[in-house]
Structure formats: C-alpha cells, structure tokens
Image: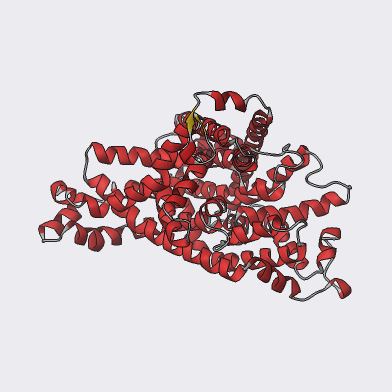
Amino acid sequence: MEKAIKRYFPIFVLPTMLAFTIGFIAPFLLGVYLSFCKFTTVTDAKFIGLANYVKIFAENDFTHSLIFTVLFTIVTVLLINVLAFAVAMLLTKGFKGTNVFRTVFFMPNLIGGIILGYVWQLLLNGILAMFDRTLTYSATYGFWGLVILTLWQQVGYMMVIYIAGIQNIPGELIEAAKIDGATSPQILKNVIIPMVMPSITICTFLTLTNGFKLFDQNLALTNGAPSKASEMLALNIYNTFYGRTGYEGVGQAKAVIFFIIVTIIAMVQNRLTTSKEVQQ
Amino acid sequence: MDKKKCKHGTLLTVIFTIISVLYVYPIILVVLNSFKKKAYISKAPFALPTGKTFVGIENYIRGIEKTGLIAAFGWTLFITVLSVAVIILCCSMTAWYIVRVKNVATKIIYTACLIAMVVPFQMEMYTLSKIANMLHMDNPWGIIIIYLGFGAGLAVFMFTGFVKSIPLEIEEAAMIDGCTPIQTFFQVVMPIMKPTCITVAILQAMWIWNDYLLPSLVLDTKKYKTLSIAIQYLKGGYGSVDMGAMMGVLVISIIPIIIFYLACQKYIIEGVVAGAVKG
C-alpha cells in the first residue's frame, strides 16, 4: 500500500509544502541570515557579523521589555491557571446554571486582541479617571491593565480544558479515596491534581507562550506608553523594525533572540510537567 | 455532570450569576457608550446615554464610513472561510501521506511542522511581508496561501495525531477493492476524520478571524482591510481618536461573533478541548 500512495506525493504533499516554504521556511531562514546583516530592504543586505546583536544591548529598551514580559508572563501563568482550575472545580460540582457560566466565561476568547484592547481601555480609563490617572500614567498601570485583560480573556479557555480533565477522572477513584478516609484537600492533592496533570501541562504551555507572544492587546491598550515603559517583547521588536529606519537588522536580531527564548521555555516546560504526568 | 445534589448549590449559583454579569459588563459598557455623543464617552463612560448625550445610531454610521467596515467585514469573512477550507483540505492530505509513507522526507516534514508551532511571528514578520510583496501575494487571495503555510504546523500535527489512530485495515480493504489513493482518502479516510476537521477548523478560524499583525503587514491595506486593521486604523489614522466611531465599530465587530458563538458554542468548546488534548 505504501508504494501505491508514495507516487501521489505531488497531489498530497506538494501544495502544503509549497505554501509552507513560502509562509514559513523561507522567511525563517532568510530571517536568521538577515540578523547578521545590515539592510533596509532584503536586496541590499550586507553581512556584518554579530554587530546587530551587540547593538541590541547598547540600549536598554530590549532588556526592559524582556523583564516586563517575563514578569507579566509569570503573573499571568500563575493567576490564569489557579483561577481557571478553581472555577473548573466549582463548575464540575453540578449546581444550577453551570453550562451558562461556562459559556459566559469562554466568550471573550472569540473576540480579537485589538478589540479587547479598546474595550478594556474604555473601562479601565473610566475607573482610573476617578483617581485622576490613565492607563498610560506609568508602566505599573499598563502592566496590571494588561494582566486584567489577559485574565478576562484566557481564564475561560483554560477553564474549559480543566473541566474536561476533571470530568475524565473516574468517579470510583474519588469514591475509593473517600472510603479510605481521605479529606477533601488530600483528595485534591493526591488524586485530582495528579490525574489532571496532562491538562496542567497543556494549559501552562499555552499561557506561557501566549504571555510571551502577546502583541495585539499590548498595541491596543497602551501601545507601550509612557515612552516604551509598558512595551512588551513582541511590540518592542515590531517598533524596532517599523519605528526607526536603519534598525531593521537589529529588529531581526531581536526576533532571533525572542525565538530562542520561546523555544527554550517551551522545551523546558514540556520536560518539567510531562515528567509529573501519571499513567491511567 | 454530577447527578447528585451539591452542597451550597443555590449559593454558588447566586455567586456565579453575579460574577457572570460582571464578566459581560465590559461589553455592555461599550454597547451603552456607542449610543452617546463622542465628547461624553471618555469624560463619563459609566453614565447612561440619556437626554442630550444620546445620539442614536450616528456613531455607527460614522464608524462604518470612516473605516470602510462593511468591506472589511466581507474581506475578513472571505479570507477566514477560504483559508480554513484550504488548510483543512491540504493539511489533512499531507498528514495522511506522511503517516502512511515512512521515509526521511516525511520525517523531516513532520519535524518542521513541530518547530513551526513554536516560532513566534516576530521572527518571520519582516521577511514574510517582503516575500509576499515580491511574489505579489499582498491581496486576499495570496494571503490564503500564506495562512496555509503558517497554519500548516498545527494543522498537520493535529491531523497526524488522528491518522495514527485509524486502523490500516480499512484503507487496505478499500485499496484491494480497487480504490486509488485519492479515492481511498476522500471516500474512506476523510469521513472518519470529520471530528478532527471540525477541531482544526475552529482553532484556525478563531486565529485567522482575529489576526491583526499578519494581514496588516502582508496586505496592501489601502485596498484591503480586515476588521482588526479597520479598528486599528481608526486609532492610527487620525490625531485624536473618535471615541464615538470607535464604540460603534467595536460593537459591530463583537455582536456577530457572539451570535455565532452562542449558536455553535457546543462545537467550539468541544473543538478547543479536543485540540488541547492533542496539542
């Protein structure tokens, strides 16, 4: 059978691979190469070695946005997962209206980041106006504004995944623990959490990468104001590319570093949490 | 759902009802403000649109005119529907092939798809927009190919996960009965893959419909705008933001999505869960 299928490579694989080459492989490889070049368009690239990478750290905006992004990601990963898990636990208790609540909490995920940014700008600036402040008064306001927005958007998504995980736990397992005299906290720690570990793996992965890659919300809510203080990595790279001429190479070098950071985090996280998963 | 009665059930229902109302409040707030005169929106966002602050649907009309929202809506729909259709078709075929034919090439393709899922868009955005420009793909037709290329990583990965669970015997029987691989795929494999197709379609549609950066860099935005671009244009195009038009545009962008969501929420939530389990 394999031989019969093999001849159909041009029909089954070629279209996807052509698009994949144009949309992913070529820009990726060209991007890596251009990070070692000075250029204003792709055709006038001149190889300059590591100069772009050195230039990144000559100014502290990149380091600042890196720290801002790391803090933001730590805070959102913890808060989103704890809240989503807690809500999932409650919503699987089977009281009236759980389906409606699940529907409501998931809803913000359907709305795009740009729209969410402006929706929350209105609300948060309205509240802050009572204290004579705006979101762009200082980076702290922008930071917590982004955290609130992200929580509102992503808690529902992760909650849905946790609910599925909790519902997959066989009822006998919890019954058995109860008969053996386990208390609720013990059941949670020794039965439920180990059993939903696959959900925890995927949810931490998603929230981690979402946190690092956040762009639309950042652009719409604060656009980095005041003076780049609330600029996250993705926006910083974007502004380096399109905000200043002659810095395209530096922007590309920043993007390569960004890529390496995201890859390392994804790999480490995957190792750490999958090792804690139990076989059913 | 648990059948037995839960302790404090009523209390939990009350608490969650309050939280749910607070949860949708940001959207209600935007709807309310969309009926107010623009000067009153930033000044007193929490006041209701009454008397002299009420302007009817004026904000909506101005918002639509300023941004070309109707066209943007059409292009977003066009790009999303066609991209998702192309992704489903091409990636399911590729996934089936690389599971059934085992050699170095298919292994490389699979690994490349895994890598593509992690790479942040910023890594590609500059070079991708230049390449798209050079190949004259800066229009809604070209961007479909780019979405296929960019979405292939996740889609192929999810389809391969499913194909691996299909028993080989079914396909072998079809081939022995004289089906070509193409017939086998469309008449035997594709129907079994329907649930995965729905999952992939939902995840990709949520991403493509709301995507801002990729279309804003790739498309010739003077000619073609998507919804996200149109909204951002309202902010960037003028010195001070016309909050009235902004509110109107936001409401028009949100309402169809919510209606769509309420109609298909079962599939959407199931799709997200299924995607997470395999992802």
Q: Is residue B99 left or right of residue A238?
A: left
Q: Quadrant of residue B109?
A: top left
- Tell me the quarter of the image containing the C terminus of chain B: top left
- Pinpoint residue A21: horizontal percent, then vertical percent: 36, 45
Q: Residue at x 60, y 48 (%)?
A: A154
Q: In this view, does A37 lie to the left or right of B99?
A: right
Q: Quadrant of residue B44?
A: bottom right
- Pinpoint residue A260: horizontal percent, then vertical percent: 50, 30
- Pinpoint residue A229: horizontal percent, then vertical percent: 73, 36
The answer to whether residue A110 is seen in the rendering is yes
Q: Which residue is drawn at 64% across and 54% down?
A: A114
Q: Residue at x 68, y 27 (%)?
A: A60
Q: Residue at x 15, y 59 (%)?
A: B180
Q: Is residue B13 left or right of residue B267?
A: right
> Given the current orientation, which residue lies at the most extreme front position?
A44
- Is A201 or A248 nearer to us in this picture? A248
- Is A110 or A66 nearer to us in this picture? A66
